[in-house]
Amino acid sequence: MPKKPSRASAALTHIDSKGEARMVDVSAKPATERVAIAEGRVVMNTATLALIVSGNAKKGDVLGTARIAGIMAAKRTSELIPLCHPLALSKVEIDIAPDAKLPGCTVRATVKVTGPTGVEMEALTAVSVACLTIYDMVKAVERGIRIEGIRLIEKTGGKSGRYRAD
């Protein structure tokens, strides 16, 4: 028996008229410059943060490894998120700022493409994987690390224009 589409599915671009998941056809959309910025936090004990900042973690350079992992993740988003388009990204930048007030690290990803669809998922995936990598590299020291607040901060380009989080 076919699924009956809900009212909400009419506004969802990845749901067709029958209520089934689909990849959006972006072939008629113009290629424009699109940028997305996402952010997240890795919260930990002060001693764990000090270990990261000093560069003395047993697994090596935590922040450098997390940066590379975030870049790699952004480039492979379409392999991880089922309905994402594969994109030829022109920029992926990962900034990781240790913050003694958290204590922990704030991870920010900026992703850019010129194409018919946005890069929000790539930025969010980059942040998520960079945060997970920080956790992985120091989990032997502290298992209670929290990953928090992963969200889209800003996006520009495309039909919907600019979005900026409060």
Image (cartoon, grey):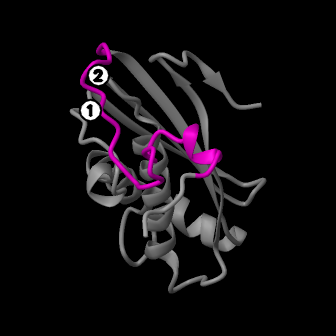
Magenta residues span 6-31
Locate residue 18, reporting x and y percent.
44, 51
**Along the polypeptide, which appears first: circle 2 or circle 1?**
1
Residue beneath the point at 54% across and 19% down: 160
Q: Please rate how many residues cluster around mark 1, counting C-alpha atoms within 10 Å: few if below 14, some from 14 to 19, many from 20.
A: some
Per the rendering, the mark at residue 133 is none
Under circle 1, the secondary element is loop
Question: Is residue 108 left or right of 83 when viewed as pictured?
Answer: right
Q: Is residue 159 above or below residue 6?
A: above
Amino acid type assigned to the residue bearing label 1 in the image: Leu
Locate residue 82, reporting x and y percent.
33, 57
Mark 2 or 1, closer to the camera: 2
Residue beneath the point at 38% across and 62% down: 61
Pointer 1: what residue?
89
Amino acid type assigned to the residue bearing label 2 in the image: Gly
Asked if residue 9 is among those painted magenta in the image, a careful observer would answer yes
Locate residue 156, reporting x and y percent.
51, 19
Q: How many marks?
A: 2
Pointer 2: what residue?
115
Asked if residue 144 is among those painted magenta in the image, a careful observer would answer no
Q: CA distance from mark 2 to mark 1?
A: 9 Å
